[in-house]
Amino acid sequence: MTLSQKGLLSRYNNEMSEEQIQLNMQRYIQGDNEAFARLYEEFHPHVYAYLRKRMSRREEVDECFQLVWLKFHRSKEKYNPQYPLLAWLFVISKTTLIDYIRTKKPALSAQGFEFDQDETEIVLPSMENLTRDQEQAISLRYLSEESFEQIAVKLKTSPGNIRQLISRGLKILRKDHV
Amino acid sequence: MKNDYQNFTTTKESAPPDIALKVKSLVQNELNPSLKIILMKLCGLHFVAGLSSLFFCHQFGHGVHRHDGLMAPLMKYGESVCQFACGGFFFLGTTLLLFFILNPDELRVVLKNRYGALLALVGLSTAGFICSGSTEVLAATTLFWIAGATVIWLVGLNFGITIKKVLKFSY
């Protein structure tokens, strides 16, 4: 990788220069807590924003975010300084997210949902045979992961009715899916 | 993938302070593990490795078999050489095993405190042999045993670090 390519790739690395990043990374590997804190401050907003865009529940984002940093820490010795740290962190974030979603996948797949090629985003099955209420209730329940009570308030009906809407909608989806 | 990476580099959102604190404390605890806990692990490891070495080499009259093992060929070169080699052999297993058992951060702490760790392990071994009734431990030749253990410990650690560096691990 040429210096200009490296510069181009590291242009996103904000205030810290490539040299500072590498220096902090070296110190961090040698056990310097402050160096880790500096790297964390520099790069964590990218990781958090990336996860927030792909997961709706705050608790899941926070859990996955911690897993990303633990994975980053436990594999720090494998970092190749020839490449920008941000690119490496991106790979760690993506693979951690995929692993995290895979642990949740069986539950979602059983409901008739599919995943995109990278398995980082849920693809909705065709909802053309559902009523508008059923479609809305299912989207709010499984994509926004809202409670039955929250959906009931949004759709101005009772939680019991929401349960029925979702149950009937899922039955139609399963039939279409098969 | 390219778009995904571009998106990653251009978007930012700060994590909540409580999560940031949790992540930093998690990493910092792993980054600088307690020396006391590492020494305990090391002593456990040395106990197992040292005990296993008794299958091949008698140590101060203690062995787990009737034949002399490595003692017979080594004694041909004299008692001092035999003690030196026995000390080295007794520490060889521990030195090799710690590269597989300890994580990189624990290993870094051991490397930083290599002489302290050696002292703890030699102390543990000596205490073990004295408790098991070996009066030979107090003989002058024991110095050769300690010298052998020290050489293998230091050479083994440097050898291990070199191998890890070749395999792209750094300390």
Image (spheres, coloured by chain):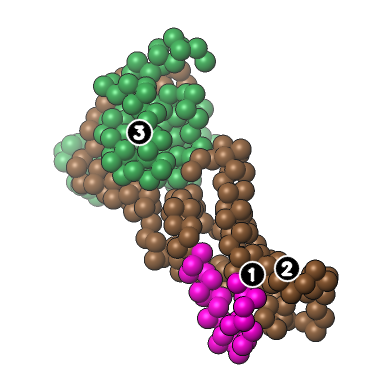
Chain colours: A green, B brown
Magenta stretch: give its range: B118-145
Q: Residue furthest top?
A: A4
- Residue B71 screen position, x and y as percent: 78, 74
**Label 3 SS:** helix
Q: Is residue B86 magenta?
A: no
Residue underneath mark 1: B144
Q: Residue furthest front?
A: B140
- Residue A51 screen position, x and y as percent: 34, 34
Measured in 3D between alpha carbons, the distance from the residue under mark 2 to the one under mark 3, in whole angstroms, is: 47 Å
Residues at marks 1 and 2 touching, judged by CB atoms closer than 8 Å:
yes
The three-letter code of the residue at mark 3 reads: Asn
Answer few, some or many: residues within 10 Å of disc 2's Cα (few below 14, many 20 plus, some between 14 and 19): some
The three-letter code of the residue at mark 1 reads: Phe
- Residue A45 screen position, x and y as percent: 27, 31
Q: Earlier in the sequence, mark 1 or mark 2?
A: 2
Residue underneath mark 2: B81
Which dot, 1 or 3, sits closer to the camera? Answer: 1
